Image (cartoon, rainbow, N blue to C red):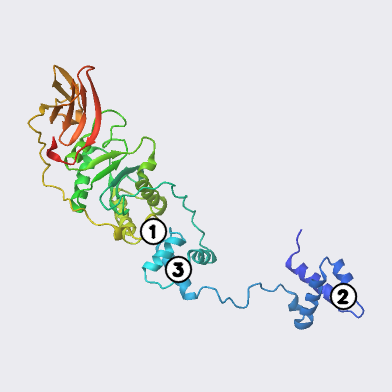
Amino acid sequence: MPFQECTVMQSRTEFVLLASQPGANVSALASRFGISRTTAYKWLGRYRQDGPPGLADQPRRPHSSPTRTAPEREAQVLAVQQRYPRWGPRKLYHRLRLDGVAEPPAPSTIARILRRHGIPPLQPAPAPANQRFEAEAPNVLWQMDCLGPLALGDGSASLLSILDDHSRFLLSVVVIPNQQQTTIQPLLETTFACYGLPERYLFDNGPPWGTSGQPGWTSIELWLYRLGIRVSHGRPYHAQTQGKVERWHRTLRSELLGWQHFADRATLQTACDAFRERYNLERPHEGIGYALPVSRYQPSARPLPDALPAVVYAPELAVRRVKRHGVIAFAGRRWFVGTALGGEEVGIRPTSVAQRSTVWYGPLLLGELDLDSQQMHRSRVYTMSRNSC
């Protein structure tokens, strides 16, 4: 059993009293007490200089620390950490720079300051992907995804997030009761009205914007194509295809959802609105060199039109109206082109290959009809010229 403090002091006192006797053999006494000669003479020296108090353990803190961070600098670090308690040292460092602090402490120093004040370090973020993609300019690509369902005090809901790929600017985060087209499409119109139209949209494969791997197109896809927005989908079961919006959701969980419980959708929406403002305007983003997302974003020059552009076909195309069940009649038989096209008109153009024709919905190539095999080979080719068909 280790000595208690009083027993240690008694042992040291006994040693120095014996060693101070005339003719005492200090080396032999040190060996019997289980200490080195250096320690023995250190205790004797302290006892002769200060008496019994000199035998107490001395503090190991240095008399001076010339490289220690100044108190006012530590106060700045602690103040910004209180504003953003879920940020790590690197983000706090760049936030201090954005706040106008000249020569803030290095991230490693900030980490030591936080530890000294009993603030545990956050779990480090996972290593970034080896292959990274970024759109070359704002509004070239938007990513969209839903997070949920989330348990609330009055039920459950989901969050619809829309993110600009280039700037990481969060265009919208909205609490929604469901993921139906009648809920999603008006929210997209609101975002388009505020920020303009992107060139391309990236989704996963789930409804309402995807068909979960089944053939055909959804109504939202066709609506976006008519607005001049190309549509692409991530690989099934590969969430990393939409890595930026997935990363945003992880940030949302870490800094907001994981620390609060929300009574209802209205409370959650208020919190998300405040967090979106902080994310865009205050939070340095590691993926863009710790810049603010708002500093790299500007609205699109393509406004949302008052009405959808009309679908016009060239005279050489045979025009067919799609029946309610997604079927057209051509060359003496019925062809399934997609239920989302019910009531719309498609154009059919012969190709240079005999017994083959392409099917178009405005600028969207739906597929190719093989009259010999009586099969339709589907496609998703999109041409930017609206009247090219």
Disc marking residue 18: 2
Q: Nearer the viewer, mark 2 or mark 1?
A: 1
Provide residue 52's location: percent of width, then percent of height: 77, 78
Name which residue lies at 31% across and 61% down.
281
Residue 48 coordinates in the image, percent (x, y): 79, 82
- Residue that lies at the very extreme toward the left in this rendered image: 315
Residue closer to the observer: 126 or 269:
126
Q: Earlier in the sequence, mark 1 or mark 3?
A: 3
- From the image, tell me which residue sits under label 3: 77
Q: Nearer the viewer, mark 1 or mark 3?
A: 1
The residue lying furthest to the bottom in this view is: 49
User: Tag 1, which secondary structure?
Assistant: loop
| Pick the front one: 278 or 90 | 90
Of the numbered discs 3 and 2, the one sitting upstream in the chain is 2
Query: Horizontally, is 345 left or right of 9 in the view?
Result: left
Q: Earlier in the sequence, mark 2 or mark 1?
A: 2
Element on which disc 3 rests = helix
Q: Secondary structure at mark 2?
A: helix
